[in-house]
Amino acid sequence: MKLWMIIGVPGSGKTTTANKIANNQESTLGYKPAIFEADMYFIDNNGKYNWRATDLYKAHNWCYSKVEEQLQQGKSVIVANTFIKAKERKAYIQLIKKYNAELEVITCTGHFKNIHNVPAEKVLLMLNRFQPFSQDELN
């Protein structure tokens, strides 16, 4: 059982990378690992994205609970969020310990048009605050 944690600023290629991993793992695992992103919380039943700053905390809690649900079932899973700071990754690292799952962290660094129209100034601020993953986070 494995958790792929895909990190990077908006427009860095997280969703594309998650989809590639899921497709590549289907034949190995016998199923396509589920992909969860906090942004999925903001997609309504008609597929329309409606981001609300007031619901960001709820979105991250939803994402975390979905990842945990997969791990509880013994399934590998992919989570793709910005995870700008180490503290944002901590809860997921606790999950891998709790369920004895393997962790692979992939940092995306591409420069694509972000799909949720995050302003370039905001992406630059996030990039300047970005803390790369360190093995020390596992301790």
Image (cartoon, rainbow, N blue to C red):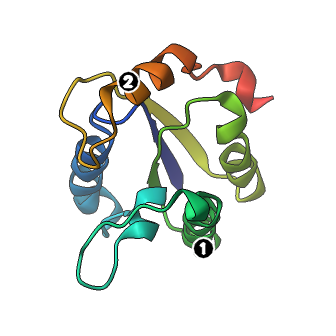
Q: Which mark sits nearer the N-terminus, 1 or 2?
A: 1
* For residue 108, above or below residue 41: above
Residue 123 locus on image (x, y percent): 39, 27
Q: In this view, does 134 lie to the left or right of 35?
A: right
Residue toward you, 47 or 106: 47
Q: Distance between the residues labelled 1 and 2?
A: 35 Å
* For residue 68, above or below residue 117: below
Residue toward you, 95 or 127: 127
Say which element carries label 2: helix
Residue toward you, 120 or 101: 120
Residue 36 is at least partly visible in this image = no
Residue 128 locus on image (x, y percent): 51, 14
Crowding around mark 2 (Cα neighbors within 10 Å: few <14, some 14 to 19, many 20+) is few
Q: Which mark is residue 69?
A: 1
* For residue 65, above or below residue 56: below
Say which element carries label 1: helix
Q: In this view, does 60 lie to the left or right of 128?
A: right
Image point (27%, 36%), residue name: 13
Q: Which mark is residue 57?
A: none
The residue that mark 2 highlights is 121
Image point (35%, 61%), residue name: 29
Work out which residue is located at the far top of the displayed protein and give it: 128
Q: In this view, does 101 lie to the left or right of 25?
A: right
Image point (48%, 21%), residue name: 125
